[in-house]
Amino acid sequence: MNDDSSSTSSTLASSTRGPKSKPKRKAKTQTRSLLENLRNEWALFWASFVPDKQDEGGEALSPEAFLDSLTLDRTKDLKKSLSDERRKLNRDLEKIKRQIDVLQSKQDSLKLVGGDISNVESEIHQLTDQGQLVSERLANVDQRLKLTRSHELVLKKQNLSAQS
């Protein structure tokens, strides 16, 4: 009889541990793959605007030199793309913030009833890390958007002075 109860206990223990550990691995894998996908998309996005040519010295073009090589229409397209990317990143940050708020409420509830909060804390930390990465990308996009806007103004002034 003790053998049955011990095997039942071990089966119950393994069945309760099993499903909890799998989502953690899945969440970490999903977070990693999401971040890798974001990095790849960003690299592809930037590569679509960077010319394949290098300057005469054999070095890669600086952002300013790259912008100087663009026409006004191409600069407007770049500005629109960067604005869209900025909007998307802001939406992503808001989504992450809402998820963190929900998890913090859940964490507070679990604290009140004496439940295990370690899973919730790890999810909050993962979302916080993800939010930091998105914030860094947003700062990068903002910087590039600012450069693009200033270059667009310069091109518009040049066009106006050429027309006069």
Image: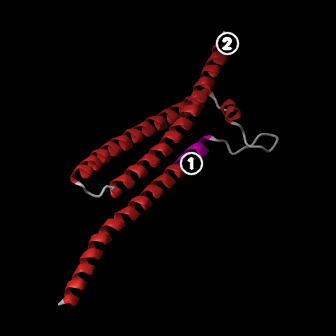
Instruction: Point out which mark residue 44 bears.
Output: 1
Residue 54 location, quadrant:
top right
Image quadrant for the C terminus? Answer: top right
Tell me residue 30's x, y (percent).
42, 58
Q: Residue at x 45, y 54 (%)?
A: 34
Image quadrant for the N terminus? Answer: bottom left
| Badge 2 element | helix
Where 53 sits versus 73, above or below? below
Instruction: Point out which mark residue 161 bears.
Output: 2
Q: Residue at x 36, y 52 (%)?
A: 121
Q: Residue at x 33, y 41 (%)?
A: 98
The answer to whether marks 1 and 2 mark residues whose Cβ atoms lie closer than 8 Å is: no
Which amino acid, by three-letter code, is at mark 2? Ser
Lateral position of residue 92 relative to residue 51, left or right: left
Tell me residue 55's x, y (percent).
77, 40
Instruction: Write the start and end of the magenta stretch as one range.
Output: 41-49
